[in-house]
Image: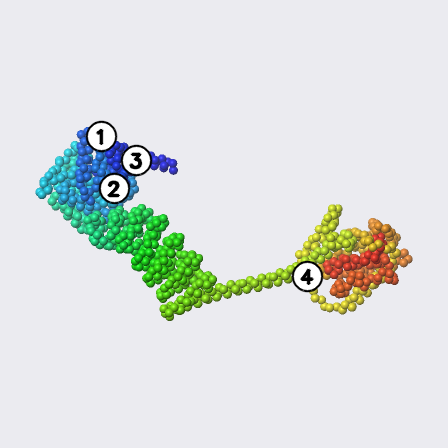
Amino acid sequence: MESMLNKLKSTVTKVTADVTSAVMGNPVTREFDVGRHIASGGNGLAWKIFNGTKKSTKQEVAVFVFDKKLIDKYQKFEKDQIIDSLKRGVQQLTRLRHPRLLTVQHPLEESRDCLAFCTEPVFASLANVLGNWENLPSSISPDIKDYKLYDVETKYGLLQVSEGLSFLHSSVKMVHGNVTPENIILNKSGAWKIMGFDFCVSSSNPSEQEPKFPCKEWDPNLPSLCLPNPEYLAPEYILSVSCETASDMYSLGTVMYAVFNKGKPIFEVNKQDIYKSFSRQLDQLSRLGSSSLTSIPEEVRDHVKLLLNVTPTVRPDADQMTKIPFFDDVGAVTLQYFDTLFQRDNLQKSQFFKGLPKVLPKLPKRVIVQRILPALTSEFVNPDMVPFVLPNVLLIAEECTKEEYVKLILPELGPVFKQQEPIQASNMILLIFLQKMDLLLTKTPPDEIKNSVLPMVYRALEAPSIQIQELCLNIIPTFANLIDYPSMKNALIPRIKNACLQTSSLAVRVNSLVCLGKILEYLDKWFVLDDILPFLQQIPSKEPAVLMGILGIYKCTFTHKKLGITKEQLAGKVLPHLIPLSIENNLNLNQFSSFIAVIKEMLSRLESEHRTKLEQLHMMQEQQRSLDIGNQMNASEETSVTHAGSQIDKVFNNIGADLLTGGESENKEDGLQNKQKRASLTLEEKQKLAKEQEQAQKLKSQQPLKPQVHAPVAPVKQTKDLTDTLMDNMTSLTSLSVSTPKLSASSTFTSVPSTGLNMMFSTPIDNTKRNLTNGLNANMGFQTSGFSMPVSPNQNFFSGTSTAGGGTMTLGAPPTLSSYSSLSSAPAAGKQAPQRPADMSALNNLFGPQKPKVSMNQLSQQKPNQWLNQFVPPPGSPGMGSAAMGSQVNVMGQTTFGMQGNPFFNPQNFAQPPTTMTSSSSASNDLKDLFG
């Protein structure tokens, strides 16, 4: 990037230095700013052509500069001859004024280093265009390098040169003497202009006589810049030292040949031996055939052959050449007419401009932009001609790019947008612009649209002409999508509404409604509902066309997907407005039917939407009501479940507490929490607590059990069987009476070791196999460690010592343990009974898996003491001592362990009243008497 910048900088610096050195000190620089070197021209392409502008007016010009350094190699007298020749040519050109001659803006100025003069803006010389790039900058402009002449340009260019020669020969009585591609200049518009009058010869005879042109003999010793180009010079000029107007026509023929032959002349001349070359050339010209002119178009080939004839009198003159059919081309004629436009009156111009749109498509774009467009825009100064010129300008704008439009056309249209006088021309201009509004809005920048285009549209809506308003209203929908929304909302729509309300023309009012209906899709919903629909109610007219327009807007808004009318608007504003309009007397049957159809459709949608809304509201209310009822039911159910769950938690938490505390009734509910707070728990106790927590967690995660329906069983039979079984058991147990002191009311049972539940059995009891029915989970049973108590064979099995503080149990560790005899046999003689299998029927009936035969409902309705009294005689009964009572309580305490899951079997319900137990020692003895 840096290298490119440096290269550009060096190029600019070099060009600036060249320009500075070329024109330094020349008086031309006082009035003109010299720009870039663009081309070269004149005899030998000695003149450098620069862009330039006039300082005072900023008018664009071309600055021709001859740098005297080019002739430093010559002698002084040769330099003077060259300078004199160049000066003579420029001075002669300055005196001549004709459209086909290069126009001089500033005469020749000489300084120590250069010669300079200014002309109209120039593109290049014909020699540059044909590929001769001598005396051009090193970086040739792509515009010149890639330039290709179109047929119409070539035809009209040669026609222009012919017209220029005709002017010189007929009017000025002058022979140019050096008609070459170097002396034909293409100006910025593409017109071909003649320059290089260095060797021109004027007639020596008076104007009324036949012109006679003296000729100088060819001097090969003179510098080349002091001699005409011999390749384009007529043979008689060298061979017979004569010249006439026909000599210029020969030069024209050679130029035509070079134009169609890529810049190469028909003959190459040896400048060292000019006479021999011309003699050979003369011989070739005499035998010139059509085969030598194959590069020339057929329709002009014969004329070129005539121009190259050896005999000057055979050659056509300039005026005859302008009339040959080759130049009778529609494009060339059109361009020629533009060049003579200033000579025409308004009527002729108007007729020509009317037919121009048919010709423009046949012309190349560059020719139109360079040649025709400037001529058209120059007519904008004539207000009467603007309506005729404007359609052609807009037609050209369609073929231009946006950049070309902004650069070449839009600046010229600015005054036309604002033109209001004369009124008739102003109205026609408005009509033309409205018809091409899509073009203007597409290619015009947004700022210029707001500043120039839309104000013109607003002016058309407010124009007094009904035709202008109608056309504007009809055209607005075609370019509404190109108008920015704020301009449409704040400027365009209000003017359309005003035109509808204030006009006295029914057509304008109807067109206003139609226009609004067509541009509704470009508006937002709320603007239509808040601004457009209320406006419809302000229209005072009741003509059928107006009413149908109002109906159309309502229908478009109602049915459009993006817009739509809310049911509140339908019910409150639209239907109350439409229904009275539907019964206007001016409406015919079809119009009335249209009104009724729209009204019915609106009512149907209104009913559907509101019904749907009410149904949804009703459904939501029902769902809310059912949700409230469900919440209440769920709350009660959750309360019950929570209560039951809490009872279950308490029961199962109390299991662990009972096992650890020996059935303390005061701390049953908080036993597990108290144990967790104790800091002196053993590892075994912690493991047991963890197992109990896991078991409780599993019970919580189980689904609630549904009550099972069982066949009714006679309660009397159940009660009788259970009582008999229990009474038999108690009778067997009471035979082992031991006198114990009474327990105090405040005493409690001593703790039973948690690892000794299988006492009195030789093998551990597998409680997973002997399931206890507890009312909640039939699979729950005891989990014991299976440890048994050894007893000495000589020891009284039920004897023991009592202490005031509580019962103690001495556990020995003999290798064997005596089998436990039947509980129903009494050791009266103190002698060991024969060993036999223990009769466990009584205990099995109490702890076995069979269901109790007493109804749970009956048991739950009795008080704890009443239920207990059914099985145990009251204290003081015959044959029932305190020890037996203690044993029974322990037996019942053990019974409750199998029913922990049922809320009716709370261990607290089975606790013996405190009055029956007087001593903790006595209770401990009773346990010993029962279990050894």
Which circle's residue, 4 or 3, is located before the other in the chain? 3
Amino acid type of disc 3? Val
Task: Check disc 2: other Cα within 10 Å, few if <14, some if 14-19, many if 20+.
Answer: many
Q: Is 425 situated left or right of 489 in this image?
A: left
* Residue at the spot of label 1: 73
Numbered disc 2: secondary structure: loop
Which circle's residue, 2 or 3, is located before the other in the chain? 3
Which circle's residue, 1 or 3, is located before the other in the chain? 3
Above or below, comparing residue 311 to residue 360 in the picture: above
In front of the other: 409 or 126: 409
Above or below, comparing residue 767 to residue 414 in the picture: below
Above or below, comparing residue 749 to residue 537 in the picture: above
The answer to whether the residue labelled 1 contacts the one labelled 4, judged by CB atoms less than 8 Å apart, is no
Task: Check disc 1: other Cα within 10 Å, few if <14, some if 14-19, many if 20+.
Answer: few
Alpha carbon of mark 2 to alpha carbon of mark 1: how far?
A: 32 Å
Disc number placed over residue 914 in the picture, else none: none
Q: How is the image coloured?
A: rainbow
Q: Is 32 situated left or right of 1 in this image?
A: left
Nearest to the eye among marks 1 and 3: give it: 3
Nearest to the eye among marks 2 and 3: give it: 2
Amino acid type of disc 2? Pro
Task: Check disc 3: other Cα within 10 Å, few if <14, some if 14-19, many if 20+.
Answer: some
* Residue at the spot of label 2: 121
Disc number placed over residue 705 in the picture, else none: 4
